[in-house]
Amino acid sequence: MPTSSDALDALRVENLGKMYRIGERHAKYRTFRETISGLATAPFRAARRLAGGNGPPPSPESIWALRDVSFRVGQGDVVGVIGRNGAGKSTLLKILARITEPTSGSAVIRGRVGSLLEVGTGFHQELTGRENIYLNGAILGMRRREIDSSFDEIVAFAGVEKFVDTPVKHYSSGMYLRLAFSVAAHLDPEILLVDEVLAVGDATFQRKCLEKMEDVGRRGRTVLFVSHNMQAIARLCPRTILLDSGGVAVDGPSHKVVASYLSSDIGTTAERRWSDSRRAPASRAARLVAVRVRSVGGEVTDAPDLRKPIGIEMEFDVLEEGWSFSASYDFYNEEGLLLFGSIETDPEWRNKRRPLGRYATTAWVPANLFSEGTVIVNVELLTVHPLTRHFEERQAVAFHLVDSMDGDSARGDWGGEWSGAVRPLLSWGTRIVPSGEPDSGVARKRESHVS
Amino acid sequence: MEQVEIPTILIRPSRGWIALKLGDIWEYRELLYFLVWRDIKVRYKQTALGATWAILQPFFSMIVFSLVFGKLAKMPSDGIPYPIFSYAALVPWTYFAGALSQSANGLVDSANLIKKVYFPRLTIPIANSLVGLVDFAIAFVVLLGLMFWYGVTPTWRIIWLPAFLLLALVTALAVGLWLSVLNVEYRDVKYTIPFLTQFWMYATPIVYPSSLLKEPWRTVYGLNPMVGVVEGFRWALLNTKTAPGPMIAVSAAASVVLLVGGAFYFRRMEKTFADVV
């Protein structure tokens, strides 16, 4: 826990809470008609809402996105914030960035605050790279002379020297994101709030971003860094706060917090081993030894490339002869939605009795099937005839998929939000249909963007 | 490293009416500048006719009004040729109507910024109401050309013109503040704006002179701030006899009341923008 005195606290958060009315974040705005029908039933509530409201109405349809959160951050500390989706991370950052107001509690911040909640906020497609640097810089709170003095550095960091006077609508999504991050990375406030910006760009650019963040920390800036990327958290932040359903669950040294998150929750964990065989999931016939996520190259990874096949390997011991086995995996996304399940179909072992020994079964998920985000795998070992479940391990492994935005994933050139549980790469074709001859012509691939 | 005074920010729930914090807007004047600059730039980059639009709209309205109201309806025009009589009113009116609808839609159009970055939210409607000044300037040059064509020589009264323009700006901003806040909560507002501006135009002496009204009703008419603006423009440029004194004072007062009320209402509702917009 931090021990710095009050005077050195860059950030002091006390009992911070934020309540949303259910539906407010999703249903968004109302229409007159709804309000008028509401007026008939609840005139006072509606009238008060119209006048701005005085605090939250006590309503059963409200949820606390954040409740009683207290912590302190010393000046110059770099602190990570982790937690599953909906734990309140983004709400916390939005309150500290003064984008939204808390419902209760308070926060005191000493110093100028810069927030990077999304790169490229305020970029305008019609404007050139140069114009967007100035516009975006001003939006992020930079002074004009600050932008002037770091202009060349921003352009060089993004690697867009040749296109600085081209409208950004002609940029590839990779260039666009690099430029956007570059402007934000040159913001130099006393306190920097960062939300998951490292999930963009290719591996090289991500490394550059991490280095830039380390640099910010080294210069004595206070950083609050929200991420799903446990490696980045562990590398950048000595201390981490784990949020769970709106409250602080754990606050301490990053390696401990990350470990507790990974073991208890749905953090990413590329490999699980049960070294103590007495504690391993098992039946009298079989016992789980390990589960791993592998890339095509064979290495264990918690951040595989979604454009390549991903292998899920389960290692187990057969303890009793006479059984046939089938491994079965279920893949969930971080919202707990079952994406799909799969059962072993390897003909070599199908319905065959296995001799004693250790087996490693791998299922390869095709390339370009997942969307970015966290995928959690439940594994089990079954015998189909007679139906027996030998063991089951929920949330055995989890991995985090990142789209490098190079334009060759199923995203194409689209760099924005993407919904849908899976994102397979379909085979697209467009042909010119000559008039009067509707069925002639050859499928033509669309020319890709400049990059 | 130069050590400057470190600002301390206190974040906590606000209650009731809150201070306007105009100092914050001054702090963010560069952002204000860039927002105006962006809108002007994008506007002239995206439209094929660019600056011509600034002239076409009031100019064609002037032609139609001259035919319908001037020639057919024989509307009085204080002894001024009808085309220039209506155009001198249409130039500030076109600016006002544009600034009003821009600032009323501004918060919704900037939803992405509001949800991602902090800055004084008042910056948005202020920027929106400034952008149209470029179009105004272009249309105004045409007005000067028309005055020359009709042989109208401006007098010393022209020095008052900036004051009337400011009155138009303040009125557009004031109404824009109210509407932009309501627009965040009720998207219906967006659809009422074209109707509102059209209705308001006929409630303002653009196609007719305010001299049709007898005192004291003419002064009461000044409660519509645009009455003061339009008659002020005619008085300053065309030397009309409708001496605007008390009427303009009423218009200015009405406009300031609207603006102050709008600014406080805006500040009060500001905290919910990011959650609702």
Image (cartoon, coloured by chain):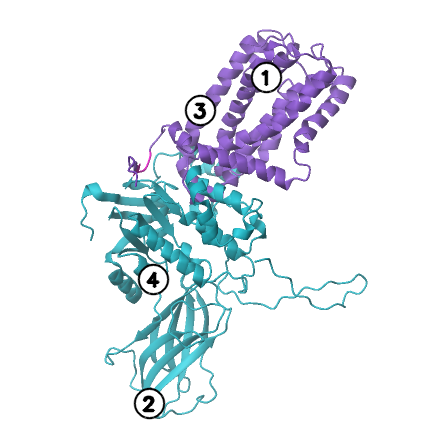
> Of the numbered discs in the image, which one, if any, rests on residue A357?
2
Residue flagged by tag 1: what amino acid is it? Val
Q: Quadrant of residue B158?
A: top right
Write down the chain letter for disc 2: A
User: What residue lies at 26% left-to-right and 57% top-to-bottom?
Assistant: A238
Q: Colour of chain A?
A: cyan
On the picture, is A385 further left or further right than B188?
left
Write down the chain letter for disc 4: A
Q: Can you tell which of label 3 and label 2 is closer to the viewer?
A: 2
Give coordinates of residue A410: x percent, y percent: 54, 64
Disc 4 residue crowd, few under 14, some 14–19, many 20+, Cα 10 Å: many
Question: Do pointers 4 and 3 mark residues of a single chain?
Answer: no
Residue flagged by tag 3: what amino acid is it? Gly
For numbered disc 2, what is the local secondary structure? Answer: strand
Q: Can you tell which of label 1 and label 4 is closer to the viewer?
A: 4
For numbered disc 4, what is the local secondary structure? Answer: helix
Q: Which of the marked residues, 1 or 3, is nearer the chain's N terminus?
A: 1
Q: What's the CA distance linking mark 4 and mark 2?
A: 35 Å
The magenta segment: B10-14
Q: Colour of chain B?
A: purple
Is residue B55 something one can see in this rendering? yes
Residue hosting label 4: A230
Q: Which of the marked residues, 4 or 2, is nearer the chain's N terminus?
A: 4
Disc 1 residue crowd, few under 14, some 14–19, many 20+, Cα 10 Å: many
For numbered disc 3, what is the local secondary structure? Answer: helix
Disc 2 residue crowd, few under 14, some 14–19, many 20+, Cα 10 Å: few
- The image quadrant where one finds the C terminus of chain A is bottom right
Residue most toward the right?
Answer: A436
Question: Do pointers 1 and 2 mark residues of a single chain?
Answer: no
Residue flagged by tag 2: what amino acid is it? Gly
Q: What's the CA distance linking mark 4 and mark 3?
A: 50 Å
Q: Nearer the viewer, residue A379 or A228?
A: A228
